[in-house]
Amino acid sequence: MTTSFRTDTDRLAETVDFVREQDAAALLPLLLPGLDALELRALVDRCRLSHAALLVFPPAPEALRTLLAACGLPADVAPRPSVVVRERVAARYRRDAAALDVQILRPPVAGPDGTDRTVEVFTLTVPPGSDLAGIAEQERVREHEAHLAFEIEHPDPLVLRGMCAIFARHGATADGGGYNPHEDGTVFYFTAPADSKAGYRRVELYAPGDHRDVLATHLDEHRARHSAETLLRLMTGAWTTQALAVFAELRVPDAMHTGSGAGAETLAQAVGAEPESLAALLRYLAMVGVVATDRDGFRLTELGALLRADAPGSVRPLALLYGGPFYRSFGALGHTVRTGEVAFDHLFGENHFDHFARHPELAELFDQSMAAGSRMFEPLTEHPVVTAASKVPGPRTVVDVAGGNGALLGRILAAHPRLDGVLLERPHVVEAARRSLDAAGLGGRCAYRVGDFADVPPDGDVYILSRILHDWDDERCREILRHCARAMPADADLLIVERVLPPDDSASLATAWDLHMRCNVGGRERRADHYARLLADAGLTLVGHTPLPLDGSVLHARPTPALHPALHPAGR
């Protein structure tokens, strides 16, 4: 049931036909080979075939209605939130469950004897260009949420435990579940036995009402079985880092297509690799959704396409950096944890800024990697501080302190033609930024300053520190902020782009980057109140902060009136 080229329409139509034609008495012996007559009768007397389910990925709500109608289903069925599947998808792909809008709807289907059944359709909207596209491709191939369901009639704890025991006795294993308060029902998921012939790998027992007492035992069995597997997957995460790095280094994505597949031998010849080893690499990357298999071989997914060298927003430099020098230094993480010292410095004998400066190819890779994270910048062009500056009569200047290759400053200048820019950077980086901004037709509105943080240009209107402070310890951050404060007019604004640690220690990319910064750079991520204290020590006041993509934030600060020298000339 799981060929990669099937569309959502194909998958849903097949599911509808299955529900219309099957019944419990015929399915259960196929599902649980070895059932004796008494066990079969006990199951058939207490449950009925309820539905078959699958997860689909419409690009918009209107497309979902079109999909339902194309499969002969009513298109006006109201969806509800799906708690269980949302949590499963989030765990499988390490996503924030709150960011996944998984809905469930159950359009009716008549069984062979006229009985009421449904097709359980889970939906996750994936607009064109969404970062969820890789999840959609992987799920269509793996069919993790496709399952067969039986509803237990008049359930009580004794009946539920007995049915679970029969399933377990014949090789079905606990595979999670949950209680859905939106519809007051309890779900018990099982993985079908290896010799099952029912056509589905997963089975659901659905019990109306709240049966979390029985569910707790079921989930304990699931956790016991999956704990070792989960830990093993975590321990081999470094394999994924290296697989992606090699995939990018060999430029395999550039030799592949998203619309059609190619054989491993053809790809190996194109990139200069050994065919069998490349095929093994591609099979591994198919497990994580970077490539997919079809009848012609391997094709690139939309997720994997981000590793092409010429892709808009390409993350290839990040794959090479995290699989290269930072991979080596992360192997010395134990040194950082034991001593508090920077593992990169310990391994390479110097900090990463000096090391990259002595190796131009690494310096270029680092600057490209910083630009690869530019998706974080997108909303910054519409920040109220920036838009307000662009509307004031007369010239207004944005100063990007340590602004790298000018990617962020270029976005702002392109979005606001009335603004000018100043970029402060090291000599070799300034030249790269000049070429980039000139190529974009923005060079005439940008001035360039070669220098360090002590050379922050004065008299700007908006100052920007983008992903700078997390490179440094607190004392160095105070020094950088004081340089900015001294250069800023009293009415200037400072925007700081960083990943801010959540106050409640909830899951965030900032938590991962905090460990990375301590190990590889010597800096750290911080909470908003920590930044507020650093700003206050430098004579600046945190006005507020707003979220950015990729768990980023922009913190807005202004000079503290009581401390700013421009407001107290006598104190200069």
Image: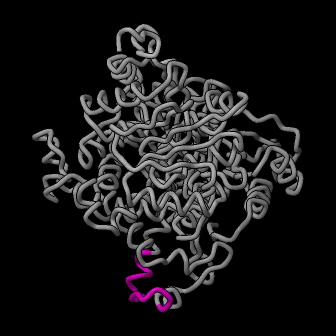
Q: Is residue 474 visible?
A: yes
Q: Position of residue 443 (x, y in %)?
A: 60, 55
Tell me which corner region of the image, top left, top right, bottom left or bottom right, holds residue 30: bottom right
Camera-nearest residue between 209 and 70 = 70
| Residue located at (59% from left, 34% from top) | 83
Query: What secondary structure prevails in the magenta region?
Result: helix
Give the vertical position of 52 relative to 10 (above or below): above
How has the structure been colored for display?
A: one colour
* Residue 412 lies in the magenta stretch: no
What residue is shown at x 40% (from left), y 33% (from top)? 217
Q: Picture coordinates of residue 318 (x, y %)?
A: 42, 59
Quarter occupied by residue 284: bottom left
132 and 37: which is toward the camera = 132
Q: Which image quarter is the N terminus in?
A: bottom right
On the picture, is 61 further left or further right than 268? right
Side of 239 where 283 appears, left or right: right
Q: Please tell me which residue is depicted at 44% across the width and 81% down the height of the picture.
A: 279
Instruction: Provide the residue span drawn in magenta.
Output: 269-281
